[in-house]
Image: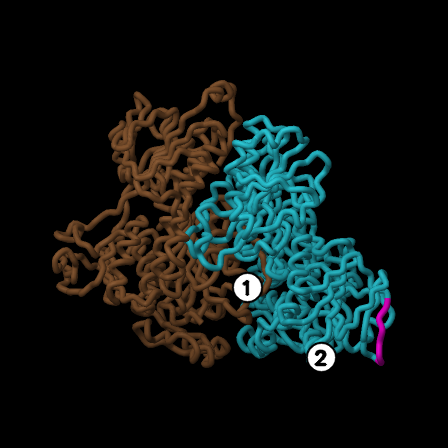
Chain colours: A cyan, B brown
Amino acid sequence: MKRKSVGKKQTKRSRAKRRIVVLGAALSGPAAAARARETDARADIVLIGRAKAVSYSVGGLPYRLSGEVDGIGGLEPEKAKFFRDVYRIDVRTGATVTAIDPDAKRVITDAGKFRYDALIYALGARSVWPEVDGLRDSTNVSTLRDLADLKKIERSLDKGTGRVVILGGGFYGVEAADCLSRAGRLVTLIERGDRLLPDFSGAAAYRAEYALRAAGVDVRLGADLVSVRKKGKRIQGVELSSGSKIATELVLVTAGVAPRTELLKAAGGKLHPNGAAKIDARCQTTLPDVYATSIAVAHKHAVTGKATWTGQAADADKSAQVAGENAAGGDVRLGPTLGTAIVRAGVLTLARTGHLDPDAQVTTVSGRSKDPFFPSHGPLTVSLYSNDAGRLVGAEVVGTDGVDKRVDVLATAILGKLKVAQLADLDLAYSPPFGTVRDVVNAAARVASRGNEPIRPWTAQQLEVPPDGVLVVDVRSAADRSEGFTASHHIQQKVLLMPLAKVGDRIKDLRGHKHVVFVCDSGREAYLAARLALSARIKNPGYLAGGLRLFGPELHR
Amino acid sequence: MKRKSVGKKQTKRSRAKRRIVVLGAALSGPAAAARARETDARADIVLIGRAKAVSYSVGGLPYRLSGEVDGIGGLEPEKAKFFRDVYRIDVRTGATVTAIDPDAKRVITDAGKFRYDALIYALGARSVWPEVDGLRDSTNVSTLRDLADLKKIERSLDKGTGRVVILGGGFYGVEAADCLSRAGRLVTLIERGDRLLPDFSGAAAYRAEYALRAAGVDVRLGADLVSVRKKGKRIQGVELSSGSKIATELVLVTAGVAPRTELLKAAGGKLHPNGAAKIDARCQTTLPDVYATSIAVAHKHAVTGKATWTGQAADADKSAQVAGENAAGGDVRLGPTLGTAIVRAGVLTLARTGHLDPDAQVTTVSGRSKDPFFPSHGPLTVSLYSNDAGRLVGAEVVGTDGVDKRVDVLATAILGKLKVAQLADLDLAYSPPFGTVRDVVNAAARVASRGNEPIRPWTAQQLEVPPDGVLVVDVRSAADRSEGFTASHHIQQKVLLMPLAKVGDRIKDLRGHKHVVFVCDSGREAYLAARLALSARIKNPGYLAGGLRLFGPELHR
């Protein structure tokens, strides 16, 4: 957030009491109202919300289902009183806004009209529903967007221990499937496309799918819901385009969300094609004195410069503070988004940040979150996306421990326009309880900074069914192999076993192939083998970048 | 690490087999040797070490004492064989180097002479001992620098359950005190100076002291060891300059380390005044074809640009890779250090990065590591040091959870030359298991970017004995106060109780003081109260930045 000094005009205007109306009381609305109060101690501030609760965490809802959050109380504190008493905000809950009149500077609600000097629009998003007859009007179908949804789901779940069907394998669907499976529920996750998590790379989506399956989730890709079977108002089963029938106790709809911007549009405010509100750097809409925040707006992307809708609560909070301060007479600018996101899937956590540019150089390296002698360490895979100038433009991190730390470091690096070569020497905190002397971020950056070298990194997908003429060589020691991952389970051809210590002596066994690809658990020994092979003039040596653990979670030890 | 393309000269030279000799087999030596092998598959590489073990983690030693690392095996794997077989390195352990002859390009050891084309000097550091009669030749006194030390300590500890005296309250002393107290040992930590942890701010050192005391460690500051009482070769007690006598079962010397650079100096290599080896960006010493790494060298600091000795293993690993690659004919450059460091002290973890410039603007804000409804969240305090241009130059983080993540983000931000205003909107990953929508880094940066405003942030130290004319006002609600910290235990004057909700009505009670300082648990409500007071024209309103939890760990709930 960049700050400009407040000019004379503002000083004069502030002598009259400013009236700020905020629409939306979930998370961004209250945050904007609070910031407005911190900016202007005298303003009249009205907060209007449809639901009864004020300032609750939409993001926390799934973690009530997993049982990690105790009781609903934690998500629904008695905050209306707090906002009234401490922030002196006029809180109007249970009120529905019907129109905005930008000429008269009024908001019309079913609880009366409200004049404003500045309006903050924070109505968030609504869920997208699949168009299937009889789905929406059932008693045991719900989205997971507010406290009413949560109560409905909890009532349905209390009735039995049957299967939950989740419709939609994006961010919210994966999160819900993870949380419900942690609570011991039987879950079927249905996704129309051929992969999960569209905001992530195919490689990461593949690992999420694998990890959810390992956690007992029945993942169905390329699956379309065609009908529901009901008894009265209650769904008893669903049928897919494949003909599969799945009995179910509860259907959860996580097929995506759309910005709730109809009122803004009706008032003449401009939207992006996906329905997100257009805002400038001050979070002002195209209407005078109307600001917008929450996941109803698009943010400027730090790498692409394009207006980008992320749907992330952390973005919403940032625009809420800027909208709140500016609506109260301040003059601050909103910084860019990086599209940072994090989600759990079984034993794995997956995170992404920046622009996963398909034209970028991608470097994938696996390592461990902490020293291997320290308890609670886990495997981590980092993929760095760098452009022609060697600058980091995007990153993905997948692992069982410390994923959030690495993605946050990489988000910061992208904002700081760091080159991968600089990240190789980035001075991260080391002590055995917290990391390793050579963090996987450093290691990945060092490999990325090698640039074009004659050793080719291969991906897990490329090796599942290797092209003709590829020799795959497992260079782990017999001991490591016996404890580790069985390469031949996933690589659909014969794998030559040749411990790294023997590569020098057996180099002639590697001749006569188009490509020789070395594999090991992490990628490091395999890279070393490829260097040895190169110096012995073996043609086209390569290695499985990121190691065999890319193939699935069974190596997460 | 910046990389240059390898020129023609290198291509020619590499046709003859290069002979690389590495001195030092603890951590940096093996890392450099491995990197040399990855760079040159054909070179002859000799690794010479004094001890029997190869490639062990010096940093892991204290965590064996805490019991967190199981058995000594994890720290001392059978790596000599691995280096011989896999990296084809000629490993010579148990050999002591006596001289380097840079003219003849030879190393002289008690196990013979070794010619080199390139030499890598990685002899690390030695412990500094207090000069007290009879201390050093005792059987139950030890440093904690290698596996032999560890074995000696474990033998002494097995004999009884008495008190351990630790000499020196720097990084190593605090780490040892923390680890031994975790194992249930009685510990007295003796520091000559008036504070712990000289690389940290006074405020952080104060919190470390407090947290160690809360964990049962007897911390003695301004305390000088004057004599030891012995029975035979065994120390039975120590006496301090104050006259205090402490019976002890084991004395641990952690009074600092000094670079082990005598051999380099004797050969004509230049050193910094503190004894650290002078190296250029290629990690080359002032001697031809002699490279240096490990904590024997000084690194360039990213903020000050000055040669800085950090003693950190992560710095040593970075120079090891650069020295190893360049010694093998590569041409890479070492990136700068940030002096990043992390240490535990009781329930707290403390971390620092960059330059804690006494002339910088310091902004301190407290928050929580995760959503308060999510289990395992904990309090966190972030202090940002920014320069006149608003750029982040240093940072400290203190808390019970997620300290490592925040300090790594801030280290990356310093390297990326980010301004605090940019950090306010930094898009960090949010989901309840990993953070909050408004990370404490964002919150601190937002406060820091406000620049000069009429509301003064006060530190805990300034409020312990407030200057004359200061009114201290506790604005927490009665409920929060009853669960929280008792302000009056630490603030040596009457504290006025005025819940934030009442400040507007009781504004006249605040008039007539030179300064009014509001306090609460985190600093946020207090800041809001100060804003209200300012708008009501109260003179010099301020707030306790970082909140009452700065006073100690009892608020760590």
Q: Does the magenta stretch include residue B60?
A: no
Q: How far apart are marks 2 and 1 (CA)?
A: 51 Å
Mark 2, residues whose alpha carbon is within 10 Å: few (<14), some, or many (≥20)?
few
Please state which amino acid type lies under the numbered disc 1.
Thr
The residue that label 2 is drawn on is A160
In this rendered view, identify the residue nearer to me: A544 or B451.
Answer: A544
Residue A456 in picture, x, y percent from top left = 62, 35
The secondary element bearing badge 2 is classed as loop
> In the rendered structure, which segment of residues is drawn in magenta?
A227-232
In this rendered view, identify the residue nearer to me: B207 or B511.
Answer: B207
Residue A201 appears left or right of A443: right
Mark 1, residues whose alpha carbon is within 10 Å: few (<14), some, or many (≥20)?
many
Q: Does the magenta stretch include residue A231?
A: yes
Please state which amino acid type lies under the numbered disc 2.
Gly
Q: Residue A39 carries which label?
A: 1
Question: In the figure, B81 relative to A189: above or below?
Answer: above
Residue A417 lies in what quarter of the image?
top right
Q: Quadrant of the C terminus of chain A?
A: bottom right
In this rendered view, identify the residue nearer to me: B98 or A415.
Answer: B98
Residue A151 appears left or right of B297: right
- Taking the view exactly as shown, the residue that stands out farthest to the right is A133
**Label located before the other in sequence (2 or 1):** 1
Residue A551 appears left or right of B175: right
The secondary element bearing badge 1 is classed as helix
Residue B27 lies in what quarter of the image?
top left
Read off the chain for label 2: A
- Residue A6 visible somewhere in the drawing: no
